[in-house]
């Protein structure tokens, strides 16, 4: 289905996310903190449900992937070995008029000119020079910029090591979670009885000094990644790469994203060690942009860590006695971006009689609240007691919410806006015949269901 105008209106999406307690700007009472966001009460539930689905799909349902939770702080040598200290940078320019600091590759891209953050400073400045008349500052419209300069994205910290031989070097907050996977490869092989091909999955925070971080939670300076490195025998890369591409694309369909709002983007300008790199892009309100990367990375990372650590990271094949550094197929997704994608996808405005309603048609498994339980009237203790009894029972299995505030219509609207798939009302008939009204978020149809059948009903629906 084509996306509606409302779904493509980022302002409306941001406003609902704030108004209903999904996402708050960080440190708001102090005037905020750029490009950092907090997940509110419903946001944390949605983000947790996304992570739960990813973890289930990537570890629980597979017998070839194990989990890991490595630390955010790591020996700084890791970031040298990985190439981040030297090469993890974006080209930065500054508008000479309003002094906005901007990403040069993004400015060029917005003007329809191909550019890539992996280009050298000279390459990108040449393209910039050739197209100067087409580039305008998005803040003030001026066309006067400083030459592009590479700006390293690693976030430094002053965490102290007072004894190590690297004590003079800066320590970093990790720029990507997968380095924790590479440096634990040997530990996992030695302890987890895994055999190649196998994967290691991890969810965790990453930090980047993003130059321009606009577009809400799409690009932030602190964010969460869901990454999996799949270790294969050299030569088997492409077969597994194709399998993972299919698996990962289907994951987003399973979250309720329409296929026409997803597409593949093939990287043309590959880093020297990569064999193939594709991104899954989602049709965000600001256009198709990267949601997840699926990359065949060869043996670059393990080779680098082997060199820099002095440790043998070869794998010994128990069947053939062959020794080799495994190749890696990586799948790397962001929690914030998936959150924004499912939120935009679910956002709907529709006329109900004379009124408009906003509804989040989230897949029930992602919805922050699955069932809302209402007594018809707040001031009738027998209705409230029965509704509480049902709520106390259902909440053991499903995240439920009890609400006795305002008229039923208002309560429905509130639950529609947070994406609750089912609302259940206890009325006077309930006390007589043991039936409640269950209202479906999407169709708004109501049906009477026996209290004793509720568990079966929700088990089938959710
Ligand atoms: N290990 C590979 C890697 O980190 P990446 O393309 O830089 O690759 C992977 O990041 C994913 O992490 C992206 O597809 C995106 O979903 C998420 N991501 C990256 N930078 C982000 C940022 N600044 N804010 C939010 N999400 C980000």
Image: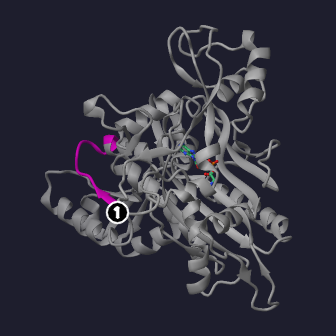
User: Which residue is depicted at the point 50% across and 11% down?
Assistant: 98
**Which residue is at the front of the view, 142 or 305?**
305
Q: Quadrant of the N terminus?
A: top right
Residue 111 on image: x %, y %? 72, 20
Q: Where 184 sits versus 257, above or below?
A: below
Secondary structure under tag 1 reads: strand
Give the magenta part as a residue range.
400-410
The number of callouts visible is: 1
**Which residue is at the front of the view, 454 or 39?**
39
Residue lying farthest bottom?
A: 319
Residue 149 on image: x %, y %? 63, 27
Q: Is residue 436 visible?
A: yes
In the displayed structure image, the side of residue 227 where residue 116 appears, left or right = right
Residue 343 on image: x %, y %? 52, 44
User: Which residue is depicted at the point 62% across and 9% down?
Assistant: 144
Identify the colour scheme used.
Answer: one colour
In the displayed structure image, the side of residue 171 where residue 150 appears, left or right = right
- Residue 107 counted in the magenta span: no
Q: Where 221 sits versus 83, above or below?
A: above
Residue 124 on image: x %, y %? 74, 27
Local crowd size for mark 1, using a 10 Å CA cut-off: few (<14), some (14–19), many (≥20):
many
In the displayed structure image, the side of residue 120 where residue 225 appears, left or right = left
Q: Is residue 439 visible?
A: no
Q: Which residue is mark 1?
A: 436
């Amino acid at each position: 289905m084509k996306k509606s105008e409302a779904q493509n209106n980022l302002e409306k999406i941001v406003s609902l996310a704030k108004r209903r307690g999904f996402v708050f700007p960080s440190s708001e009472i102090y005037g905020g903190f750029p490009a950092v966001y907090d997940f509110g009460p419903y946001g944390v539930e949605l983000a947790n449900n996304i992570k739960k689905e990813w973890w289930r799909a990537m570890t629980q349902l597979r017998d070839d992937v194990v989990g890991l939770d490595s630390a955010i702080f790591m020996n700084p040598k890791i970031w040298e070995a990985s190439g981040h200290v030297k090469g993890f940078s974006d080209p930065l320019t500054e508008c000479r008029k309003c002094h906005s600091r901007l990403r040069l590759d993004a400015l060029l891209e917005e003007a329809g000119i191909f550019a890539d953050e992996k280009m050298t400073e000279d390459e990108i400045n040449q393209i910039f020079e050739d197209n100067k008349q087409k580039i305008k500052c998005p803040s003030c419209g001026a066309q006067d910029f400083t030459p592009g300069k590479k700006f390293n994205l690693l976030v430094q910290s002053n965490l102290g090591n007072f004894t190590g031989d690297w004590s003079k070097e800066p320590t970093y907050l990790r720029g990507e979670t997968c380095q924790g996977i590479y440096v634990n490869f040997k530990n996992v092989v030695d302890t987890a009885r895994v055999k190649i091909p196998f994967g290691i999955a991890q969810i965790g925070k990453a930090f980047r000094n993003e130059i321009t971080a606009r577009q809400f939670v799409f690009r932030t300076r602190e964010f969460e990644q869901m990454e999996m490195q799949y270790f294969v025998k050299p030569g088997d890369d492409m077969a597994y790469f194709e399998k993972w591409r299919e698996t990962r694309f289907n994951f987003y369909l399973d979250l309720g994203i329409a296929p026409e709002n997803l597409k593949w983007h093939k990287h043309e300008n590959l880093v020297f060690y990569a064999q193939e790199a594709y991104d899954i892009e989602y049709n965000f309100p600001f256009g198709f942009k990267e949601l997840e990367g699926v990359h065949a990375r060869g043996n670059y990372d393990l080779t680098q860590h082997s060199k820099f650590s002095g440790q043998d990271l070869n794998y010994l094949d128990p069947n053939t006695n062959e020794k080799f550094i495994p190749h890696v197929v990586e799948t790397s997704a962001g929690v914030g971006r998936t959150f924004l994608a499912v939120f935009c996808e679910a956002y709907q405005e529709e006329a109900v009689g004379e009124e408009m309603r906003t509804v989040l048609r989230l897949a029930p498994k992602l919805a922050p609240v699955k069932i809302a339980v209402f007594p018809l009237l707040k001031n009738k203790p027998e209705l409230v007691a029965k509704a509480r009894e049902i709520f106390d029972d259902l909440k053991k299995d499903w995240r439920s919410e009890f609400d006795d505030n305002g008229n039923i219509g208002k309560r429905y609207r509130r639950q529609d806006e947070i994406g609750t798939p089912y609302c259940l009302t206890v009325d006077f008939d309930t006390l007589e015949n043991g039936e409640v009204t269950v209202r479906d978020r999407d169709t708004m149809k109501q049906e009477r269901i026996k209290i004793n059948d509720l568990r079966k009903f929700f088990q089938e629906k959710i």
